Image (cartoon, grey):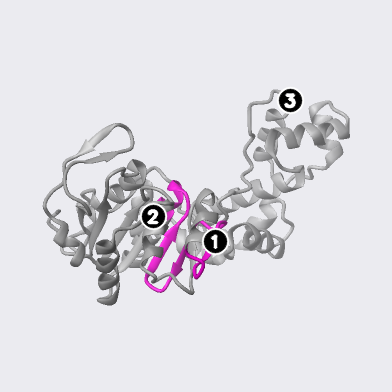
Amino acid sequence: MPNTSGPLVVALLYDGLCTFEFGIVAEIFGLSRPEMGEGWYRYASCAIEPGQLRAHGGFVIQTEDNGHLIDEADLIVAPGWKGAGVPVPQDLVERLRAAHARGARLASICSGAFVLAATGLLDGGVAATHWRYAEALGKAYPDVEVDAASLYREHGRLFTSAGSAAGIDLMIEIVRRDFGPDAANSVARRLVMPAHRSGGQAQFLERPVARREGAEIAPLLDAIRADPASAWTISRMAGFCRMSERTFLRRFRDATGLAPGDWIAAERVEQAKERLIRGCESVDEIAIALGFGGGHALRHHFRRRLGVSPADYRARFSVTA
């Protein structure tokens, strides 16, 4: 463990380990970060079963004899699980229950929600998991309300997240809660990540990005990004692409998955996010600059797409020098 004195984070190791999910936990909590001071996290990887453990990707892990740290951890993370139908060992269930009873937090990434659900501690609460596991999780644990849409959810001191990338968002959110937004932003920047997404965002984001390269539509998308405040009517966009309006609408949806108005609104929100965290403009000024007309419209689209207000987003993710 690093020479620090902060909360002890333990990632669970198991045969069939989900490598990427484990890597998320090790990267965020186990990487040396001297700039954070002596109070930064301590980290350990602890096996829940003996011997060499296989991991996705064709390699084997030789674990340390440190399983006792599970009983001392402040945060225990289940980075995925062996499968929806694979039972969670009763010994692990009891140890997680005991950890929670003494005040530890439990977290999961993706299919790791099955581990937390097995403890019974999620009963009566809401849990997030990858959309492909949502139905199986709900059937296996009917007392748990499964949220197949959100990136991550909290129930008491239990945190669950959706697919792998959502685990990054959840882990950075935990950093933010423990050490504040500056520390969370520092970790995100080192990961070469943008300011992390709030848990209420959908797993399927309406991102203003083309599904595939298209010589007919791509120049228009670039033009809109460069001048989002302009009046981009259907007739103007169709003329830009030298198509009839009917053909344009079909080609636009084929390329982006969205109607033109939805795509433009999403692009404006994306640019608003950047301006909110990197500048000192007011919400009204940003709204006018991006073509929303006023702050009310920007707040509406912001809440609808992100689940938070522009002011809350700026307070949470503002980048400091």
| 28 relative to 221, above or below | below
Return the mark for residue 112. Answer: 2
Amino acid type of the residue tagged 3 in the rendering: Glu
Question: Where in the figure is residue 76, as x and y percent of width and height?
Answer: 28, 61
- Which element type, helix, strand or loop, lies under badge 1? strand
| 118 relative to 257, above or below | below
How many residues crowd mark 2 within 10 Å: few (<14), some (14–19), many (20+)? many
Q: Which residues are magenta?
A: 141-169
* Residue under numbered circle 3: 216
- Which element type, helix, strand or loop, lies under badge 3? loop
Task: Report, in whole angstroms, how far the alpha carbon at label 3 lies from the one at label 2.
Answer: 43 Å
Task: Report, in whole angstroms, how far the alpha carbon at label 3 lies from the one at label 1.
Answer: 38 Å
> How many badges with numbers are in the image?
3
- The residue at the far top in this view is 215
Residue 321 can be seen, yes or no:
no
Return the mark for residue 147. Answer: 1
In this rendering, which labeled residue sits more in front, label 3 or label 1?
Answer: 1
Q: Give the position of the C terminus as an image quadrant.
A: bottom left
